[in-house]
Image (tube, grey):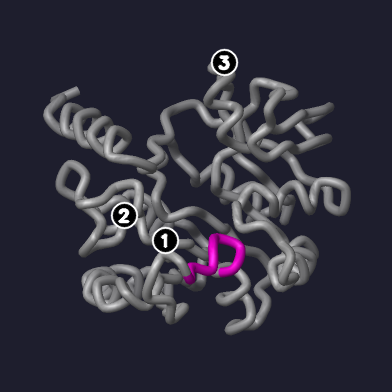
């Protein structure tokens, strides 16, 4: 079982901070954005490899970052493999699903994978969802209850049935069908990955990650796991400042 982290964006909405470094490697309260996720993945039993995809412009910086993690991950039996999609400017970017296709076409299809965006900080434990996935090989999405309609219009929204089975999925809906906002972190078994690989290799596929689930909802059984906690999406300068303030304050809190 593996993790695939999508970190190949150019972060144009965060200029000038991201002219010379990627969003995923921006410092937040003394750690990079991606470090928060890697710290959780390093403790996942049964995780064999982490595949991280970068664009060509920022690939050397990820190489330097990866050298800092290689020994710790290796001690846990986890291989860190970096992939360079070769793109040097934002106009030619592959998009999230294009970069996922790039990785899936370079590796043997695993028996299961966590697929996550590399510009989010999850302030809740992913380990329980991972353990359920590892034990049962159920396809899982993570959801949080969101009452702000405008925020729901900017994300994937899930409609859930009995036992929290996913019945419908809408990516950035004008009229959100529920309060369940889907997070950019998916646990997919091999059957689903076969379908995802075909989808992302389609030249006409959209680039947003949420469309993976929209494609799978009527083809695979998928369950939702409600997360109790905060997700920080480092999407713009205001989001970045909010994350820095919140996590710096947490670090100073002796409790």
Q: Give me the C-alpha separation between circle 1 and circle 3.
A: 29 Å
Category of crowding for the residue at label 2, using alpha-carbon neighbours closer than 10 angstroms: few (below 14), some (14–19), many (at least 20): many
Q: Give me the C-alpha separation between circle 2 and circle 3.
A: 27 Å
What residue appears at the point 23 percent right and 34 percent down from the top-left corner? 241
> Reading the chain from its start, which is encountered first: label 2 or label 3?
2
Q: In this view, does 148 lie to the left or right of 38?
A: right
Residue furthest front in the image? 91
Q: In this view, does 52 lie to the left or right of 2?
A: left
Task: Name the residue that disc number 3 marks.
Answer: 147
Screen quadrant of the N terminus: bottom right
- Circle on res. 23: 2
Q: Give me the C-alpha separation between circle 1 and circle 2.
A: 8 Å
Q: Is residue 39 left or right of residue 108?
A: left
> Reading the chain from its start, which is encountered first: label 1 or label 3?
1
Number of marks: 3
Q: Looking at the image, which is closer to me, 170 or 93?
A: 93
> Reading the chain from its start, which is encountered first: label 1 or label 2?
1
Using the rendered view, name the quadrant where residue 118 is placed: bottom left
**x%, y% of residue 6?**
48, 62
**x%, y% of residue 240?**
27, 39
SS category of the residue bearing label 3: loop
**x%, y% of residue 54?**
40, 71
Q: Magenta stretch: give its range.
A: 92-98
Residue furthest top in the image? 147
Label 1 close to label 2 by CB (< 8 Å): yes
What residue appears at the point 65 percent right and 21 percent down from the top-left corner? 179
On screen, residue 162 above or below 125: above
- Circle on res. 9: 1
What is the chief secondary structure element of the magenta stretch? helix
**Would you say residue 188 is visible in this rendering?**
yes
């Amino acid at each position: 079982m593996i993790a695939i982290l999508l970190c190949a964006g150019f972060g144009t909405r965060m200029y000038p901070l991201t002219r010379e470094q990627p969003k995923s490697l921006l410092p937040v309260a003394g750690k990079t954005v991606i470090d928060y996720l890697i710290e959780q993945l390093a403790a996942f039993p049964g995780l064999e490899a982490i595949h991280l995809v970068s664009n060509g412009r920022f690939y050397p910086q990820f190489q330097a970052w990866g050298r800092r993690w290689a020994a710790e991950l290796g001690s846990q039996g986890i291989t860190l493999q970096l992939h360079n999609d070769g793109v040097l400017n934002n106009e030619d970017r592959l998009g999230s699903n294009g970069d996922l296709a790039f990785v899936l076409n370079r590796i043997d299809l695993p028996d299961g994978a966590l697929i996550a965006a590399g510009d989010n900080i999850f302030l809740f434990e992913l380990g329980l969802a991972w353990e359920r996935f590892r034990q049962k090989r159920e396809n899982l999405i993570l959801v949080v209850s969101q009452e702000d309609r405008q925020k729901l219009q900017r994300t994937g929204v899930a409609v859930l049935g009995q036992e929290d089975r996913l019945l419908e999925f809408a990516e950035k809906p004008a009229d959100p069908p529920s309060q369940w906002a889907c997070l950019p972190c998916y646990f997919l078994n091999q059957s689903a990955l076969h379908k995802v690989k075909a989808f992302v290799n389609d030249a006409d596929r959209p680039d947003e990650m949420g469309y993976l689930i929209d494609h799978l909802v009527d083809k695979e059984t998928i369950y939702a796991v409600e997360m109790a906690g905060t997700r920080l999406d480092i999407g713009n300068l205001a989001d970045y400042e909010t994350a820095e303030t919140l996590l710096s304050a947490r670090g100073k809190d002796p409790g």
